[in-house]
Amino acid sequence: MFNKINTSTSKTSDKQEIYSKKAQPSIQNKLAPSILGSDLTVIGDIKTKGDVHIDGRVDGNITANGVIIGEKGIVVGKIIARSARIRGNVTGKVDAVKIELTETSSVKADLTQDQLIIANGAFFDGKCNRKTSSTAKKEAIKTEHNNINISKASG
């Protein structure tokens, strides 16, 4: 009923599994979102290949994969992203494939998007320009290329 297990073989295979590439999660596939807390103010630009959540204030431009502006978040500048969900205040420009203005948002900006969702109760004052799918793809490639150049120059 109770058989003795060869522990030397078992430990070796466990170590091999722990250190194998298959057991390690891919960092490139899933970047953790960057969060700017409500007590922080950034004066300058934010650039990331991942997602960013703003609960504080940004006086500058934001370039990211996904941007969420929290209910108390304030952005004065340009947002460039694949998707932008705005629950707070934005003044400037927003350029994204998908833009969502929730019922708590106050947006005084020009929007360039492929898909736009405006919830009942959202405040919006500005222009809307719809991208074509080919334009959106070209701009996404251009943004990605610019991020690569920036990171090469930094490193």
Image: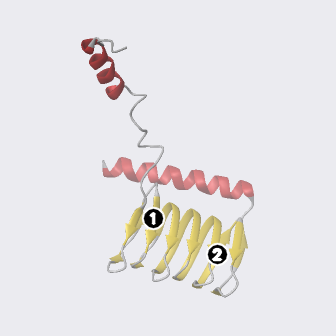
Q: Check the image and report above or below for 25 versus 43.
A: above
Q: Residues within 10 Å of mark 2 (few under 14, many from 20)?
A: many
Tell me which numbered mark, 2 or 1, is placed earlier along the sequence.
1
The amino acid marked with disc number 2 is Leu
Q: Which residue is mark 1?
A: 52
Q: Which residue is mark 2?
A: 111
On the image, the x and y values in percent for residue 105 come to 58, 83
In the image: residue 125, left or right of residue 152: right
Element class at badge 1: strand
Q: Are marks 2 and 1 in contact (CB under 8 Å)?
A: no
In the image: residue 30, left or right of residue 81: left
Q: Nearer the viewer, residue 50 or 5?
A: 5
* Res 131 → quadrant: bottom right
Disc sitting over residue 36 in the figure: none
Q: Residue at x 54, y 66 (%)?
A: 80
In which quadrant is the N terminus drawn? top left
Q: Residues within 10 Å of mark 1 (few under 14, many from 20)?
A: many
Q: Nearer the viewer, residue 141 or 8?
A: 8
On the image, the x and y values in percent for residue 38 come to 37, 79
Q: Residue furthest front?
A: 1
Q: Check the image and report above or below for 99 versus 143.
A: below
Q: Residue at x 70, y 84 (%)?
A: 120
On the image, the x and y values in percent for residue 71 come to 50, 81
Q: Nearer the viewer, residue 13 or 31?
A: 13
In the image: residue 31, left or right of residue 95: left
